[in-house]
């Protein structure tokens, strides 16, 4: 449990550092999305204990963990288009 917290803190600091050092890099949203996916999977396994949950709950968690980084990538690369689609 302590190792999981340490990994989460390190990944958060790495994300913060990457956003400062490589602010204009086109690949940065992809790397941040991968970090978010890994952090979500770590939280689900270590804190929510998805590996012992009912299969339906585990699938819902996996779906959410995948959708959050995909939404980040979609808004990073297609933000203006998505905003136009969402306006009334």
Image (tube, rainbow, N blue to C red):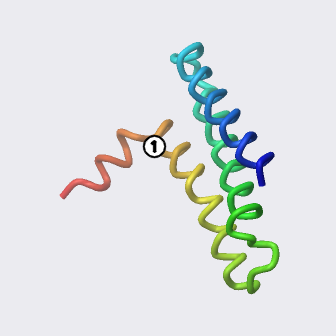
On the image, the x and y values in percent for residue 8 come to: 68, 43
Q: Is residue 38 above or below residue 44?
A: above
Considering the image in quadrants, where does the C terminus appear? bottom left
On the image, the x and y values in percent for residue 37 come to: 68, 50
41 and 59: which is toward the camera: 41
Q: Is residue 35 above or below residue 58?
A: above
Report the residue at 73% width, 40% height from top: 6
Q: Secondary structure at mark 1?
A: helix
Considering the image in quadrants, where does the N terminus appear? bottom right
In the picture, measured across the screen, residue 33 lies left or right of residue 4, that is left
Report the residue at 52% width, 45% height from top: 72
Res 34 quadrant in image:
top right
On the image, the x and y values in percent for residue 76 come to: 48, 37
Dot 1 corresponds to which residue? 75
88 and 71: which is toward the camera: 71
The single residue placed furthest to the top in the displayed view is 21
On the image, the x and y values in percent for residue 14 come to: 66, 27
């Amino acid at each position: 449990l302590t190792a999981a917290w340490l990994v989460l803190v390190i990944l958060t600091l790495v994300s913060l550092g990457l956003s400062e050092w490589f602010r204009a890099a086109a690949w940065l949203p992809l790397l941040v999305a991968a970090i978010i996916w890994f952090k979500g999977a770590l939280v689900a396994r270590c804190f929510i204990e998805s590996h012992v949950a009912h299969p339906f709950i585990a699938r819902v968690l996996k779906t959410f963990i995948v959708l959050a980084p995909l939404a980040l990538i979609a808004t990073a690369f297609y933000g203006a288009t998505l905003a136009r689609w969402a306006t009334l």
